[in-house]
Image (cartoon, rainbow, N blue to C red):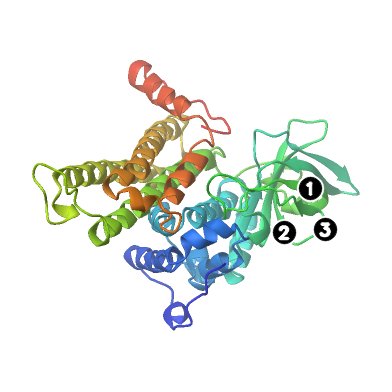
Amino acid sequence: MSITTPATATWADPLPSSPAQWVARAEAVATQLAIDAVERDRANATPHAEVQLLKDSGLVTLLGPVEHGGGGQDWTTANRVIRAISAGDGSIGQLIGYHYLWFWAVRLVGTPEQVAAVEQQAVENRWFFGGAVNPRDSDLVITEVDGELVYNGKKSFSTGGQVSDVTVLEGVLDGTDNHVFAIVPTDQDGIRFLGDWDNLGQRLTESGGVEIVDVHVPWEAAAGYVDRVFRPRVYNTLNVPLIQLIFANIYVGIAQGALSTATTYTRDKTRAWPYATDVKASAHEEFYILETYGDLQSKLWAAEAITERAAVLIERINAHADTVTEQERGEAAVVIAAAKQVAIDTGLEVTNRIFEVTGARATANSVGLDVFWRNIRTHSLHDPVAHKRAEVGRHALLGEIPEPTWYT
């Protein structure tokens, strides 16, 4: 089962022109996604219609330059959009989040000419980005054949996979330590998706394995390389804090969707306990229900606040990305690590405890409250949250900042 893009004038209107309008559009898309999110999760079908909705609504162009028809927005707005979409469907929230990361990555690694060319094409054609860059696997091997780079290898995760227009590849030039990123068309014989994504949660993210076989890339498309020498535009480890902040916003968004769904269920269907010493006429008069919702909402607001604080630090870095220092990057990474752990803890608590205030009948598969917990539980295992707590601890106790890695 898949969604049907609404046949209205909504998406035919001009693109939003302010951050608030972009978030409002994302909320409208999320409302559409939420209608049959449970059924689509159960079907576990490739989300072609869902990605088309992101394209039709213009959300895929949010970070693109205005002169090419993009939204011209910043990461603060992008993260709010990710939260909004995740509230309607966590899988699609992850897809749009990863899309934004890979759309933006060329700005961090590419030459000015590459940035201009990629962003123009991406906006004008409303490309949807996927990536085959899982760092826990062996790197793709790059050989040079007749003056071109040829990628070969296998990645066990490739989020966006079969629904992407272009795929970001990363590999190591054979015989060297040189990593090379490139953006290539997804629809080619050399990119073979394994169709093996069938997990507990985030089931519609198309995050299964991919095999790369003899994918040719001209040297001119090697991101950040000039005359075969790596000359990135900026300090090129900024993409890792960005994706960690995207994770935090996905979790907060899913938890927001869970709490909203639960409150509606409680108001409409949950019954007061008839054997209490102080019997109430309705469930929403029960003290323990009010107390639980108050506790969960307060914690969720706090999680949202720290993700917003982290976004402020990212914006400061982006304002002078060419000269950002290791200290500035590290301080931002620490706050992002804090945001991520708070988002995980809060998200898991919200998605678990909502059952306490909805009741036994809310465990029916048709209600689908389990989807929220399954989604956060699955993705929050991406990298161990204990290491994020330790990063914050080292900073608080010793004044240390995290050393840049593929996960920090």
Pick whichever of labels 1 and 2 is earlier in the sequence.
Answer: 2
Q: Looking at numbered disc 1 in the image, what kind of residue is underneath it? A: Ile
Q: Is residue 176 left or right of residue 94?
A: right
Q: What residue is shown at x 51% (from left), y 41% (from top)? A: 378
Looking at this view, is 209 or 81 the one in front? 209
Provide residue 144's location: percent of width, then percent of height: 86, 43
Provide residue 25's location: percent of width, then percent of height: 39, 68
Provide residue 21's location: percent of width, then percent of height: 35, 68
Looking at this view, is 329 or 392 the one in front? 392
The residue identified by callout 2 is: 186
Looking at this view, is 126 or 294 the one in front? 294
The quarter in which the N terminus is drawn is: bottom right
Mark 2 neighbour density, 10 Å: few (under 14) some (14–19) many (20 or more): many
> Residue 294: which quarter of the image?
top left
The residue identified by callout 1 is: 212
Q: In terms of secondary structure, where does tag 1 sit?
A: strand
The residue identified by callout 3 is: 189
Q: In terms of secondary structure, where does tag 3 sit?
A: loop
Q: Looking at numbered disc 2 in the image, what kind of residue is underneath it? A: Thr
Q: Looking at numbered disc 3 in the image, what kind of residue is underneath it? A: Asp
Are the two marked residues, 3 and 1, in contact with CB atoms closer than 8 angstroms? no
Q: What residue is shown at x 45% (from left), y 54% (from top)? A: 365
Q: In terms of secondary structure, where does tag 2 sit?
A: loop
Q: Is residue 194 visible?
A: yes
